[in-house]
Image (spheres, rainbow, N blue to C red):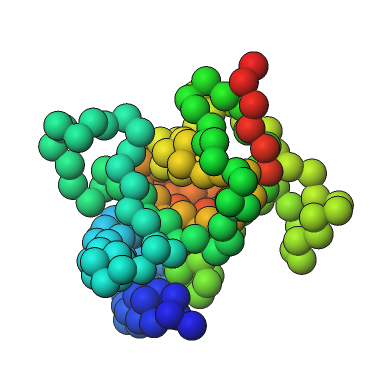
Amino acid sequence: MQIKKIIYPLLLTVVAAFAMTSCSEDDGIVEEFPDWQLRNETYFNNLTDSVQRLISSGRTDWKRIRTWSKGEGDYLSNSDYIIVHVLENAPSSETITPIYTDSIAAHYKVWTIPSTSYRDGKVFDSSYKEPFDKDLAVAARFYVGGGLIDGFTTAVQNMRRGDVWEVYIPYQLGYGTEPKDDIPGYSTLIYKIMLIDHWSE
């Protein structure tokens, strides 16, 4: 699949770098997230370059979406965008996207880029258990403008009922530079989001 041609080399680069630097020669203590800021910035910038080339070639299953909190006239950098891989498209009859004052129901899972012990990234939150069962899973409910991270808010305001997206969020649009619970600062966040419904309050 084409997705593997883009993401797999990025993951190999990150994992190889971890293998070389994650263990201290002095005390044998393994670092879970060594050089985390640099690794995350490099990962996201490389992903951005790859996706921009795909978009330029006409691919429509990848998107680069400006954060909702900035306008076209603002100075923009890579960290002002989320990157989206469309896994499933909503039915063509669905044309309306949520707005900032709406509420949504969605299934989601979120994880980091690979670290020393988590070669596929550390999953730190999910609204469902694996394997996903649509008949048993209960969708989470959010108010779009209710204090969600900017990257998530940006994503859902561009989705339609039935869309399933994998969303890559730079730390600047996520939890920033400080740790959040068990999420280290500077973490790129990778979400799988399934938008089930949205409505006005």
Work out whether residue 122 or residue 167 is closer to the camera in this orientation and state it.
167
Q: Is residue 191 above or below residue 181?
A: below
In this view, the residue farthest toward the right is 136
Q: Is residue 160 above or below residue 61?
A: above
Kindly identify the residue that appears in the image at 37 percent across and 76 percent down.
6
Q: Position of residue 171 (x, y in %)?
A: 35, 47
Q: Quadrant of residue 9?
A: bottom left
Q: Position of residue 90 (x, y in %)?
A: 60, 52
Kindly identify the residue that appears in the image at 63 percent across and 32 percent down.
198
Kindly identify the residue that appears in the image at 20 percent across and 35 percent down.
72
In this view, the residue farthest toward the front is 93
Q: Is residue 132 left or right of residue 150?
A: right
Work out whether residue 196 or residue 21 is closer to the camera in this orientation and state it.
196
Q: Position of residue 106 (x, y in %)?
A: 65, 43
Q: Position of residue 15 (x, y in %)?
A: 39, 78
Work out whether residue 24 or residue 136 is closer to the camera in this orientation and state it.
136
Q: Is residue 117 left or right of residue 154?
A: right
Q: Is residue 47 above or below residue 37?
A: below
Kindly identify the residue that appears in the image at 32 percent across and 30 percent down.
69
Q: Is residue 199 at all visible to an observer of this figure?
A: yes
For the C terminus, the quadrant is top right
Work out whether residue 72 or residue 14 is closer to the camera in this orientation and state it.
72
Q: Quadrant of residue 56?
A: bottom left
Q: Is residue 172 at all visible to an observer of this figure?
A: no
Q: Is residue 62 left or right of residue 121?
A: left
Q: Quadrant of residue 150?
A: top left
